[in-house]
Amino acid sequence: MTIDATMVGRSYAAAESYQVGREKIREFAAAIGDDNPAYTGDDAVAPPTFAFMLGSRALDQLLNDEELGLRLDRIVHGAQKFSYTRPIKAGDEIAATATITTVRKAGDVEVIMYETALTTVDGEPIATSTSTISHNRADS
């Protein structure tokens, strides 16, 4: 099946929420080489790109939607931007939902834009990520 406008609006929630821990924030900051002291201690906040890791849990659901028929070996991740309501903090329990916002064809390439909303499990908005992936369905 090819991607078309009927897919716009489909939402994919992460299978479960994510409990943000101080140690995970510290490990993530170390992995990206950022020694900002805000990422350590009892009141640690997460580096901005930590949101991608949380959102990727919802993206997994989108990528595994059998109706979309996407193949990872034919996907290129394009633009991505983050918009924050507040920083992600140690102790937050985060839910992630990815929603397809735009689809278009460019030859054999399907361009899919999706928005991932990160909220607390109580519904408090934390961040939104807008991303683009390109998928080539043509046989090589």
Image (tube, rainbow, N blue to C red):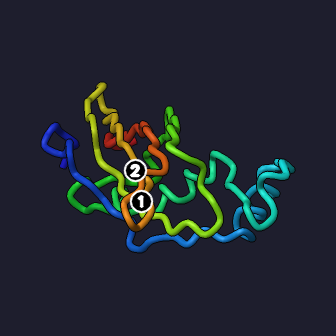
Residue shown at the point (40%, 50%) measured from the top left: 117
Position of 41 with respect to 113 (left or right) is right
Residue 14 placement (x, y as % from top left):
39, 66
Q: Which of 132/84 is in front?
A: 84
82 in relation to 88, above or below: above
Task: Give amino acid for label 1.
Answer: Ala
Position in image of residue 99 (x %, y %): 30, 48
Splitting the image into 4 quarters, where does residue 46 fall? Answer: bottom right
Return the mark for residue 96. 1
Q: Is residue 55 left or right of residue 46?
A: left
Check whether the beta carbons of the residues at disc 1 and disc 2 lie within 8 A of each other.
yes
Position of 133 relative to 107 (above/below)? below
The circle on residue 133 is none
Q: Residue at x 33, y 38 (%)?
A: 112
Coordinates of residue 139 in the picture (x, y in percent): 34, 43
Residue 75 in the figure: left or right of residue 102: right
Q: Which mark is residue 117?
A: 2
Residue at the (48%, 47%) spot, across then down: 127
Image quadrant in which the C terminus is located:
top left
Distance of label 1 from label 2 (alpha carbons): 6 Å
- The residue under the point 42% across, 40% down is 133
Please name the amino acid that badge 2 sits on. Answer: Ala
The picture quadrant where one finds residue 5 is top left
Q: Secondary structure at mark 1?
A: strand
